[in-house]
Amino acid sequence: MTEPVRFGVTGTDTGIGKTVVTCALAARARALGRRVAAMKPIESGIVERPVSGSGLASDADRLRAACGSTLPMSVLRPYVLEEPLAPMIAAARANITIDFGVLDMALAQVEHDADVVLVEGAGGLLVPITATVSYLDLFARWRLPLLLVAGNKLGVLNHVLLTVRAAEAAGVPVRAIVLTALSECDATVAEATNYDALVSLLPHFTILRLPWIDRLDDLDALAAAADVGGLDILLAPLSP
């Protein structure tokens, strides 16, 4: 039996397209006939209440829709925190203790019978979940190679290199880097040169680009963007 493709999806910052990339990859995998599962272990800045319209009120909602999952939100997102803060702070202010045993059990349910497993973090790689555990530690605990999402803007070279070095120091492999377009405006000089610079600086890494997407809840558009961006390479199992 082929081992599932598994990723911990992290970013160089918050608001740079982690959920867009995760949903695009999930939608593309489904279009190719793969069974996809995704979770966001902890999501902050969310008030749990019914919403009208599409119901896609949060990152976890979007992941669930992109995967076509029928698992309950309590599994796909075990911890939801109201304040838009790092989990360590938001949980402490809400008197909530993050139980990693609960997260382990949720992951086991999420990845059961899946061909592709995507676990989306929050913010950057070293965002603290507790005073002693970051997302890097969680991904290491779960033996998840990283899919690093980087917003194409001034400063991204530094952010990518810092993240890669932190991951390497912890022995967590970076499977690929996805440079995301953050707007449809004409590219600045930095935006026009960042990709080539990253290829030069990190010649042994897979570096991809995801084009601007303005229909974030359109699964066909997301899948098409992943196709154009060459994300299919991420869905192939690694050679032994």
Image (cartoon, rainbow, N blue to C red):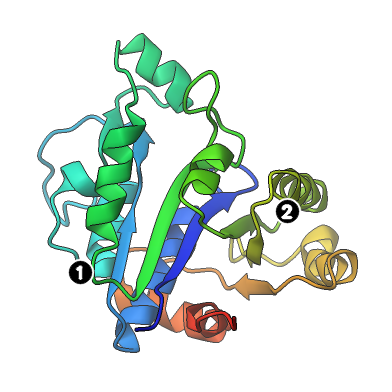
- SS under mark 2: loop
> What residue did someone put label 1 on?
68
Lateral position of residue 210 relative to residue 92, left or right: right
Q: Does residue 17 appear anywhere in the picture?
A: no
Q: Quadrant of residue 112?
A: bottom left
> What residue did someone put label 2 on?
153
Q: Quadrant of residue 114?
A: bottom left
Coordinates of residue 63 in the picture (x, y in percent): 31, 58
Closest to the observer, 235 or 51: 235
Q: Is residue 49 above or below residue 197?
A: above
Give the position of the N terminus as an image quadrant. Answer: bottom left
Measure how far apart labels 2 and 1 are at the Cα level. Answer: 32 Å
Q: Amino acid at mark 1?
A: Gly
Closest to the observer, 123 or 109: 109
Coordinates of residue 103 in the picture (x, y in percent): 32, 40
Q: Is residue 218 above or below residue 18?
A: below
Q: Residue at x 46, y 50 (%)?
A: 142
Q: Does residue 157 appear anywhere in the picture?
A: yes
